[in-house]
Image (cartoon, coloured by chain):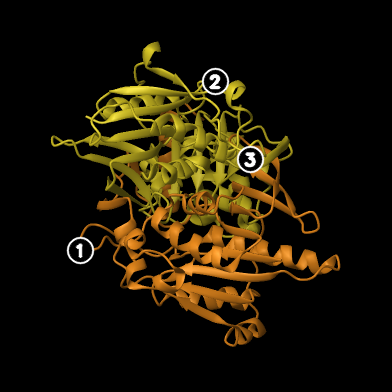
Amino acid sequence: MRIGVCIKQVPDTDSHLRIADSGRGVDDSNLNWVISSCDLCALEEALLLAEAEVARGAERPELVVFSLGPARVEEALRKALALGVDRALHLVDEALQGGDAIADGRALAAALAGERCDLVLTGAQSDDLGQAATPAVIAAILSCPYAWLVMAVELDSRSKSLRIVRELEGGMNEVLGLELPALLAIQAGINRPRFASLRGTLQARKKPLRREDCSGLGVDPGLVGAAGAGIEIEAVSLPPAGAGGVVIDGASAEAAAGELIAHLEREAVL
Amino acid sequence: MPAVWLVEDTRGGPGTQEVRACGRALGGNCRVALLEEERLGPYAPGLYAEALHALIAQGDGEDPERPIVVLLPHTYQSAEYAPRLAVRLGAAYIASVSGASLDDDGGLRFRRSIFQARLRADVRPKKRTVVATVQVGAFGGAGPAPSPHDVFEVGRPADIEEHQEREILGREAASGGGVDLASAERIVTAGRGVGGPDEVSVAADLAAALDAELGASRPVVDNGWLPREHQVGSSGHIVTPNLYVALGVSGSIQHLMGMSGSRIIVAINKDPEAPIFSVAHYGIVADLHDVAPALTRLLKARRQSA
């Protein structure tokens, strides 16, 4: 049994984002890079599933982490190894840069197919571009059962099946049965990701991390990266500031609180 | 002008109006692909994507250079299969758009939020066919209802495997009850900015002083600081109280969808760039741990003197 996890390295959501001089993206010279939050939950879920298999006396599934991106992504892969994943595959090639969800999904699907994973987990949505599409693209290309916004996973490795809970709108959940191989896009909140131990961090240095380029993956460089992307960002801008709202000076908490109460009295909501 | 497909279901579910309004913004030459569960079978992402692909890819004998835009609502169902439809059509995919326009030279532009609504991007498709999901709640005003002869029923594809890709075992409420956010007149919501499980009390104290229900943003629930029944947002409760006070809530799109219909919105946040300020009627850029206790004290004093 092999479980693959796809992760994306993104700017820390608490980073101050500056629009790049080109106006087409974010200035990436001074950012703190982390594993996207849903992807961290996908990693944790894979670790929990492996532990549950061991706890019931089954063989521990092998866990493989995949990520596409430049050299900096190696740090995210080492972190996944430190958390307990067994080995890592880094999709790194100049021709893989600048892709959208479809181009990246194509490259990741090729890598996953090469590793013949029984179950693939990803995050439901990245914290940066947030198209929430890469997992569906991978599932379409691998043509395997798929579910998005997964809030609980039970794996039955004997019958090669899954029982999952998927989030719906308005506080409802749907319970689904899927057969392996399958791909699940994990929603934030399914678990609380662990922190890497010192021992894990030391072990991670010795775990295998393999780099693959387009030819190693067997993908056409014209169908991945910027060349394979179906969309192009033309301009990035700040959202409009307050929709005509009243800004209350926050320098003095007491004064601000008093001013707000006066406004709320006038609005007749107190 | 592009040929636009509006994907609708027979229930007229959420986002139908927004999808029509987006179609109108793109020239209004619209046809409807109507999804009927009785005809298609129970929803599964592969089935719906393949069925729509079969309808849309058959073409209509029109100009093969003419752009085609397929619009779906960005709901938990259609956003699950829309990327697969884009892959099958060889189309560009653009998720949760809040704006769309057509240049004088026929070029398509879509606007969407990125970096959790901290920035927005103008996106240009590089393919002739585009699949886009439309943010529910974006696009004010209703688009015209298409005339019946422009409605095409989506059929079950003949070559679809009978084998089910996934089986629906049931539905359940995501959380227990006990919190009545839906009918609350006032709500005070704790966001990630409150800092931790022991500091949620700053929001609870203000809620008590206002006689309000206590809400929570998604990160607060995901971190276990408050149970899920407190969650406000598209995946939790959609609320429309008279007064909504957001403490340390940054304001993800999902959160804004869940509360932006409130009558009076107050936001208190240290970060002046927090997207919550874009919907707030009253904003205070300050540490909530200073302002909220001050508010609680003044409200209590006000009540005693009344």
At 63% from the left and 46% from the top, the residue drawn is B204
Residue beneath disc 2: B11
Q: Callout 1 environment at 10 Å: few (<14), some (14 to 19), or many (20+)?
A: few
Figure disc tally: 3
Chain drawn orange, letter? A
A127 and B298: which is toward the camera: A127
Mark 2 residue type = Arg
Q: Position of residue B212 (x, y in %)?
A: 60, 35
From the image, state the color of chain B: yellow
B225 and A170: which is toward the camera: A170
Q: Secondary structure at mark 3?
A: helix
Mark 3 residue type = Ala
A122 and B226: which is toward the camera: A122
Q: Is residue A227 left or right of residue A50?
A: left
A12 to A123, vertically: above or below: below
The disc at residue A21 is 1
Q: Position of residue B107 (x, y in %)?
A: 20, 39
* Quadrant assignment for the C terminus of chain B: top right
Q: Secondary structure at mark 2?
A: loop
